[in-house]
Amino acid sequence: MMLDTNNGPRPLLKKTAQDLAHVVKVGELRPAPRPAHSPLTSARSRRHVAECWHVIFAPDETRFAWLCGTSRVLIVPWNRFKNCLLSLDNTDDEGNEIKGQVVSIDTGSPVNSAGFGSGTPENQLADPPQRQYWTRFDFSNKELVFATGHVNGRVRIWDVYTGRKLLELMDHTQAVRDLAFAPDGSLRLVSASLDRTIKVWDLRDDGNMFKTLKGHSNEIFWCCWSPNAKLLASAGIGKSIMVWDMVTYSLSRTLTGHHHNVSACEFSPDGAILASSSWDTRVILWDPYTGEELRELCHQYPPPRPIFASGANGSWVRGVAYARNGGQTATISDDGLIRFWNLLEPEVDPSAIAIGDEEMVCCTFSPSGRVFAVGTKESRVSFYLAPRVIFSLKHLARMAVRRQVLATPEIDQLLLPAPLKVYLKYQDWV
């Protein structure tokens, strides 16, 4: 952990590590060490394997997907009531086999990304597809489906309960670095690739690839949907985030403000904010509908000037995640700290911290927001109990309004006092 000194950059502005609450680790997953003679111990062989680039909970928080190296994925049952893994063994206390607990998938190719999705019956969709032809697979009634993205550019769809491969999707020419299912149950799947494109697949149509989104000039590492599935944000090598209109499948706007590569991005639960993390030591909270910068979360003080932020600085922010309460984010950084931020406090420092593992590369909150999971390059995963925060009814009401009236320009059309409009647009956080 970087210490507060007067002779160099500091990780906290007004506080020290002793002034903050320390978050407790409640569980971990560690891959078995490889034998010294393993062919995967060479640097060239490790380029695309044994790297946990994603930590993924199922939408209903009943499972956790562990990318545990090379081509193996474990789908592990998760206890959403006790906030812990149920078991990593297929046997009970007496050694009897338990069916359907841990599902081990040998994907056949090194995995870079994965994601869970769930389907809604077509007759319950707001805009059901109008198809007059037979399809081979019916995913709409499945509680969960699972997708993996691979180094060879393939996307594979799996049965969560048996580990059986259902579909193989082919169109990318380079590695697939991120996957995301639309949160509206439509079973649209987007894949972001090093080939600088985003593909949109329709699992209701047997995985038909019906749109290719082009605009990035460099490799794409990350993509995420807004809660209403009308926007998609994507980022990668480069200093900008692209926001796509997923109704017209066109570029809506480009968010420019970072001074180094953008490492991750995520929408708030009400869709009103997009958080992006960058190697420039900052997290920026954006209004995705206007492109306005609403707030910055700094991980180094003083923040490096733009000319220095574009290089190595020891505080690259590797990931950012939003909790379900909409007022709390968490970040991971190369300085070894996991920071938990209460966005409704005027403080510039985080409200709690934890000492993380080495080489943290990805993070996420559980759907309930009670647990924060962090993954490393060596496929280690650690689980932390997120700080409990009780927010005001005023904030909860704002989230409820923004879920119904998502677009910021629509707020200005409401017959409300100007100060309330400012609050609803998150221009006033408190």
Image (spheres, grey):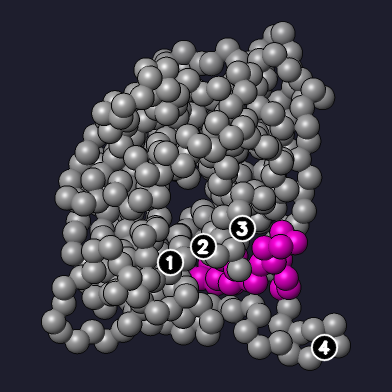
Type of residue at label 2? Answer: Pro
Type of residue at label 3? Answer: Ser
The C terminus is located in which quarter? top right
Q: Earlier in the sequence, mark 2 or mark 3?
A: 2
Please say if 388 is above or below 292: below
Type of residue at label 4? Answer: Gly
Q: How many marks are shown on the rendered structure?
A: 4
Q: Earlier in the sequence, mark 2 or mark 1?
A: 2
Q: Earlier in the sequence, mark 3 or mark 4?
A: 4
Is 169 placed left or right of 45 in the picture? left
Residue at the front extreme?
A: 415
Q: Residue at x 64, y 78 (%)?
A: 102
- Element assignment for label 4: loop
Q: Are marks 1 and 4 in contact (CB under 8 Å)?
A: no
Of residues 378 and 114, the one nearer the viewer is 114
Type of residue at label 1? Answer: Gly
Q: Which residues are magenta?
A: 63-88
- Element assignment for label 2: loop
- The answer to if 79 sits in the magenta stretch is yes
- Element assignment for label 1: strand
Frontmost of labels 4 and 2 is 2
Q: Which residue is mark 2?
A: 59
Q: Residue 190 sits in which quadrant?
A: bottom left
Residue at the left extreme?
A: 132
Q: x%, y% of residue 120?
A: 37, 71
- Element assignment for label 3: loop
Q: Residue at x 57, y 55 (%)?
A: 367
Please say if 86 is above or below 165: above
Q: Residue at x 51, y 71 (%)?
A: 71
Mark number for residue 379? 3
Measured in 3D between alpha carbons, the distance from the residue under mark 1 to the one under mark 3, in whole angstroms, is 22 Å
Q: x%, y% of residue 358?
A: 67, 43
